[in-house]
Image (spheres, helix red, strand yellow):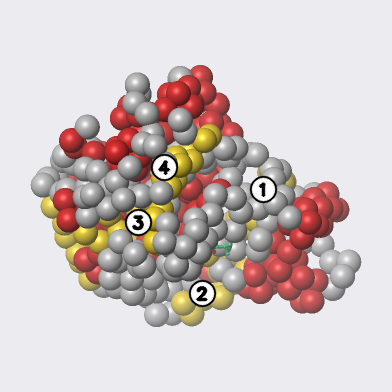
Amino acid sequence: MGKTLSEKIFSEKSGKDVKAGDFVLAEIDVAMIHDITGPLAIKAFREIAGEKAKVWDPKKIVIAFDHQAPADSVAAAENHKMLRKFAKEQGILLYDVGEGIAHQIMVEKGHVLPGMLAVGADSHTCMYGALGAFATGIGSTDMGAVFALGKLWFKVPETIKFEINGKLPRRVYSKDVILKIIGTVGANGANYKACEFVGSTIEKMEMSERLTMTNMAIEMGGKTGIIPPDKVTEDYLKSIGVDYEIPEWLYSDEDAYWKEVSLDVSNLEPQVACPHSVDNVKPVSEVEGVKIDQVFIGSCTNGRYEDLKVAAEILKGEKVAKGVRLIVIPASRSHYKRALKEGLIDIFVEAGAIVEFPSCGPCMGGSFGLIASKEVSLSTSNRNFIGRQGSPEGEIYLCSPATAAASAIYGEITDPRKV
Ligand SMILES: CC(C)[C@H](C(=O)O)[C@@H](O)C(=O)O
Ligand code: SF4
């Protein structure tokens, strides 16, 4: 029996021939902390290694401020101050406020390469798997151990092969595909599994769309999302200034998967995840007409230039419905710059949107842009749990940037194929 891509990466990083179910001590290639989980990771590191200890390799650690950035409270400002001091003392690269969402930065600044083992103190670290890396979120205590040793214990996961074929219909995107998958397998449907996305639909997706897919693997319980690296991966890396040739071993052997799930997207409708769980997914035709108070276009799931472009095409020359707030947040400074240069920001502002600096924004309800009781949010982010974006009596629907933009114009959930 052959090996999956994930098993091959763990074999490489543990120096042993390992299979799913094995426990391995693996070498970490890159580790990320942000402004919320960073302070806890540093506390754990100091407890493990001592107050004056140096991290195992400062070049392999990245810090980014995104959740409460710029600081929205004195407590957040103190956290930032402490992290800046730690980064300076240790010689760690820090992306300060305004640079963008940590996950987006990790990918676009070349910190992640195919075949790497990447960890981040955040559950959506699984997003980097779009580059063919094994990437997973870990707790802050585990991160303290990584800072000290550069290694971590893992149980090698089995892999579910998601075979996705067919041409995506007009105004249907990778977000609709991943919502459909999560709705089908359920929020626990891939617990501790590597979710590998393959098939002709994935092969045709650009990197931005692939990132949306792997980002949400955690929403079905996945240990990671992963896409075998190919020409799209190589071209993407080239576009960010990384000259990289993909090694030949980075693919899964056909007989090595634990389970297969297939989906034909040729007739897929835009999908919407309804309150209060990500797997409560319905085709847009079943939720059309639901009144909304706030629309959020952004997050590590759907805040890239490509997402903003789709939204801007729909919003061009239109106005946001009276009484609706539309918040647009580019995922990083570079995507913000590109959107500015190409006139997308103009379109949003003209339409009546509020455009904010790159950050997590209202995604987690930890910062600005909260909703009140009985208010309804329509969001391109990845989670709609009770209270996630403010009041526990509010409601959150999740969708693609196209559905979000069309709905913002009409003030109710709207099928983007109609506009
Ligand atoms: C704050 C952080 C720990 C959290 C996560 O791990 O995912 C956040 O980014 C989220 O999306 O809920
Ligand atoms: S944008 Fe949302 S999901 Fe992504 S890291 Fe920030 S809070 Fe988490």
Q: Which residue is drawn at 72% across and 50% down?
A: 71
Which of marks 1 and 2 precedes in the sequence?
1
- Quadrant in the picture for the C terminus: top left
33 on left or right of 248: right
Asked if residue 45 is positioned above or below residue 328 in the image, the reply reads below
Nearer the observer: mark 4 or 3; the answer is 4
Q: Which residue is farthest left?
A: 267
Residue, disc 1: 69
Secondary structure under the numbered disc 1 in the rendered image: loop
The three-letter amino acid code for the residue at tag 3 is: Tyr
| SS under mark 3 | strand
Q: Nearer the viewer, residue 246 or 147?
A: 147
Q: What is the distance, in whole Å, between disc 2 and disc 3 at their CAs?
A: 34 Å
The three-letter amino acid code for the residue at tag 1 is Ala
Say whether residue 288 is visible: yes
Residue 349's x, y, as percent? Answer: 48, 27
Give the residue pinned by disc 3.
397
Front residue of 29 and 407:
407
Mark nearer the N terminus (4 vs 1):
1
Residue matched to label 2 = 154
